[in-house]
Image (cartoon, rainbow, N blue to C red):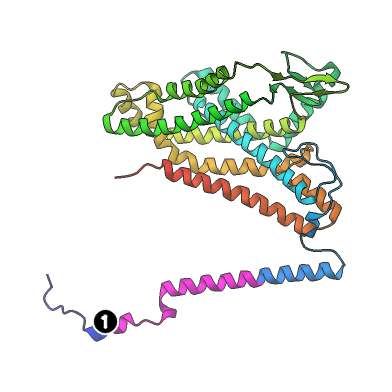
Amino acid sequence: MNLKGTHPAPEPYLKEIEKVPFWLDPKWRAVIYQIGVFCMVGLLAYYLVSNTIANLQRQHIATGFGFLHKEASFEIGESLIPYSAASTYGRALLVGALNTIKVSFIGIILTLFLGTFIGIARLSSNWLVSKLAGIYIEAMQDVPVLLQLFFWYAIFYETLPSPRQALHPVRGLFLSNRGVALPVPASIPAYKYMLLAFLSACVAAYFLKKWARKRQEETGKIFPVFITSTVMLLGFPLVTWLLFGAPIEIDTPELVGFNFKGGIMLSPEFIALLMGLVLYTAAFVAEVVRAGIQSVSKGQKEAAMALGLKPSYVLNLVILPQAMRVIIPPLTSQMLNLTKNSSLAVAIGFPDFVSVANTCINQTGQAVEGVALIMAVYLIFSLSTSVFMNWYNKKTALVER
């Protein structure tokens, strides 16, 4: 409905408005500004790189990554792949990267379990449990992670005896200042197939959970996913073990001379680094979990309980799905912090990527390339973790109607 006295704008006037110069169009200006900033950053990077290369050539210092193919000539205490002093610098750096991945992966898994447990305990109605969780959080957050690494490292060398007087609480377990010696399954086909059976059970449990959720949405009936998954995770390897004749061969460590032979040996550096990172980061994860759970209104819990749901169902079906949208973003930051804090391993002698890269820099003198590799590797670790967590965040996000 047109008001009296108003007339539509003439067509020539509208065409003049549409023909705005591109430098006055906000969208085009934004693109031009971004291109300009990108060119400035590129020119600055080119100037810095070319200037650095010129200075290095003037001082007759080798440049480039050709040193990666040269012999490293130094040993590494821990390695997941075969390595010797005759290996190349590239393989040495690969060993350091794998050690960093090992510590970070195991640390993240343990941190998630411990942090979630402490976070839920912090909200417990039991006064003692809640206070103990609060004390743990405050103590671990207030002590720098580097001091915690020094503390756990000193525990092994100052309090534990030598291998000949190693503590032997149970059969096959030895505690000494050389580390912790543990028994492991012997290298026989039965144990390999048991591992495959366990992985198959994990895949089956995943699809079972998806099917149970879809079934619940359609019918409202709850399927016992946890009990069924537990039976599969334990039953598949057990059946495989029985089919292979129930072998019990175990590779048990034994004291030979001044060290242990057989089993698996966890070094003091690895244990100190893992404990320091896990205990420190778990305190922050616990606060993230607590905040996420408390972000869900009490009315949600009261409504679920009014429907007669058990406390475990209230937590798994009502509270946690809504809390995850608050938990996952800061949880991603804590996982990245744990990975980056693993670089402090150089302080206690664990051969992580930074430690190995520093040794390579000291021997070759190519600091620019070494630091660039350190930055690139940790950037890849961080981006990979962020991509995975962002995917998981979108996957678990609540779909609003």
| Quadrant in the picture for residue 191 | top right
Q: Which residues are magenta?
A: 15-43
- Image quadrant occupied by the N terminus: bottom left
State left or right for residue 314 relative to residue 190: left
Residue farthest to the front, as pictured: 244
Question: Which residue has dot 1 on it?
Answer: 14
State left or right for residue 164 relative to residue 275: right
Mark 1: secondary structure: helix
Task: Determine the residue positioned at 38% across, 25% down.
Answer: 313
Q: Main secondary structure of the magenta part?
A: helix
Residue 336 to residue 164: above or below: below
Where does residue 275 sit, x and y in percent of width and height? 68, 30
| Front one among 190 and 129 | 190
| Quadrant in the picture for residue 326 | top left
| Quadrant in the picture for residue 112 | top right
- Residue 41 lies in magenta, yes or no? yes
Where does residue 224 sit, x and y in percent of width and height? 38, 23
Where does residue 376 sit, x and y in percent of width and height? 67, 54
Residue farthest to the bottom, as pictured: 12
State left or right for residue 117 relative to residue 12: right
Alpha-carbon neighbours of circle 1 within 10 Å: few (<14), some, or many (≥20)? few
- Residue 37 lies in magenta, yes or no? yes
State left or right for residue 136 relative to residue 145: left
Residue type at numbered disc 1: Leu
- Image quadrant occupied by the C terminus: top left
Residue 88 to residue 124: above or below: below
Where does residue 94 sit, x and y in percent of width and height? 72, 46
